[in-house]
Amino acid sequence: MSNKWWENRIVYQIYPRSFADSNSDGIGDLRGIISKIDYLKELGVGAVWLNPIYDSPNDDNGYDIRDYGKIMKEFGTMEDFDEMVKLLHKNNIKLVMDLVVNHTSDENYWFKMSSLNMKNRYTDFYIWRDKPNNWASFFVPSAWTYSETRKQWYLHLFSAKQPDLNWKNVDVRNEIYAMINRWLDNGVDGFRMDVINCIAKADGLPDGKGDGNVFSPEYFVMQPKMHDYLREMRQTCFVGRDCMCVGETPMTTKENAPTLVNDGQELDMIFQFDLVEMRDGIDKWHNIPFDLNKFRTILSTWEHDMKWNSLFLSNHDQIRAVSRFGNTSTDEFRIRSAKMIGTAVHLLKGTSYIYQGEELGMANVPFPNMEAIRDIESRNYYKNADDKDLAFKTIVKNSRDNARTPMQWSVDRNAGFSQAEPWIMVNPDYKKYNVEAERQEKDSVLNYYKKLISLKTKNEVIIYGDFKLLMETNKSIFAYERTLGDKTIRVFCNMTNKPVKIKIEPYKELLLTNVDKPKIARFEAYESRVVSV
Ligand code: NOJ
């Protein structure tokens, strides 16, 4: 047992734009976060991760950084930031910031200088070619855009306003490390590193196999050089500091992920997407029915292969957890299944990340039309689709905007998020699902999550215990046990909408359940039970 701070704390993910608006401009901000520190205490979380709050033109909601040293105007000032850090720390809450260093904004000074048709310090800060290769980007058909000033093409794995940095250039790396160190000196306790496994590109940028624009992750995901850069970054910035590094690493596999984490020289843990995608390689716009066997295999494999995991059910890029893994067809099922999926995942071994609103059972949003959609990825998908009706229906079900609507605080106007019209619509279900109402309601998802958080953070067996899958072939129940010394706890979750008859072994104590009176030989639909034996 090493007792690193992130091992026994739960991280609460805040999407600042949609969390709390203190100055009535319809956009969440840092003073809004400050005003909710009491709520974070009440929940029992020990850290927050903020999506990017740096100066940005917001082509991709802050993932396009114009100035790494400044706070985004809508979010506040450096003084607000300092006060937020001070108050979080005073309340024993750590601060994890987003680190976006695969790309910057095209409005970043470095890129502006690099695009000039003349030699300067920034000429090689980005990836320039006379002729583009055939790579497709994550967001738009081609990963290349022509610069009229420089008369060359630049690479962008995301939007044209997000040019990729050239990590081969030691000056780029040194600038980034200096920037990281400045934020650490400002009180930051950790970083969530955006698409960090994409920072190195294959030498020569080979064409992808296929016709037209080809999405070619084999040439930019998990390249050997990436390991060198991450090791160098750790040495230059993190050694000797009590700082947590979690990598956002799309397309990592259970075979290559351990190389990022297990020897402790690169990252402390990663976000991998096997669970939230469960798609067998089919893209994010297609819905695949929930499959308990896949769910079980994914979770148990990662528990076995990784020294430490990140546990999450949703984030700002995913649809709402209860809409994906639970059942929102009735309030009864919604409330019970939201509690059950939280139990299934957050009691595994690893650091739990709770995405804002998950603790209320917030669900997907009935967006009425494309005008209500803000997300660049969804808007591009619509633009490029032939059948617009189908594209819109697909977007309503799968868009990242489902997770980005305002946090639901109360029954007040705009769910208590803002006095002004919010930048994105409020989910109309806020009258029932909101913090104030759920505080009063004994059996709410919120009150259950408080117990779940307390259970997870206060029990060594749940923090450090070994994991073992139980009932491996059961068609309804996902079950496992965690053991440390002579202590064992067991978790049982009925993941279906039907009761099942099943007898579990006698237990010492019932630690947590989402039903009124659990029966000995029967599990209700979506029932979860945590017991010690
Ligand atoms: C992953 C972030 O989570 C997502 O929101 C963003 O669009 C891309 N990286 C690009 O930065």
Image (cartoon, grey):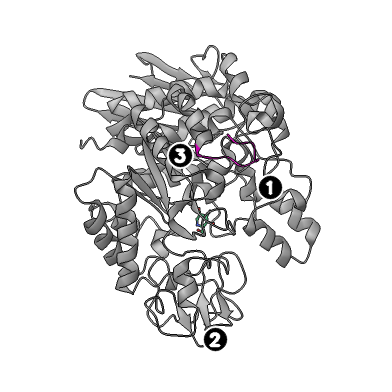
Q: In this rendering, would 454 be left or right of 440? A: left
Instruction: Between residue 409 and residue 441, name the one nearer to us.
Output: 409
Residue displayed at 71% across by 39% down: 421
**For the stretch drawn in magenta, what is the main secondary structure?**
loop
Which region shows up in magenta?
Answer: 21-30
Q: Residue lying at the far top in this picture: please name it.
A: 517
Amino acid type, callout 2: Lys
Instruction: Between residue 59 and residue 345, name the one nearer to us.
Output: 59
Q: Quadrant of residue 345?
A: top left
Vertical placement of 4 versus 198: above or below? Answer: above
Q: Quadrant of residue 229?
A: bottom left
What residue did someone put label 3 on?
Answer: 80
Amino acid type, callout 3: Asp
What residue did someone put label 1 on?
Answer: 397
Q: Is residue 465 visible?
A: no
| Quarter of the figure that contains the N terminus | top left
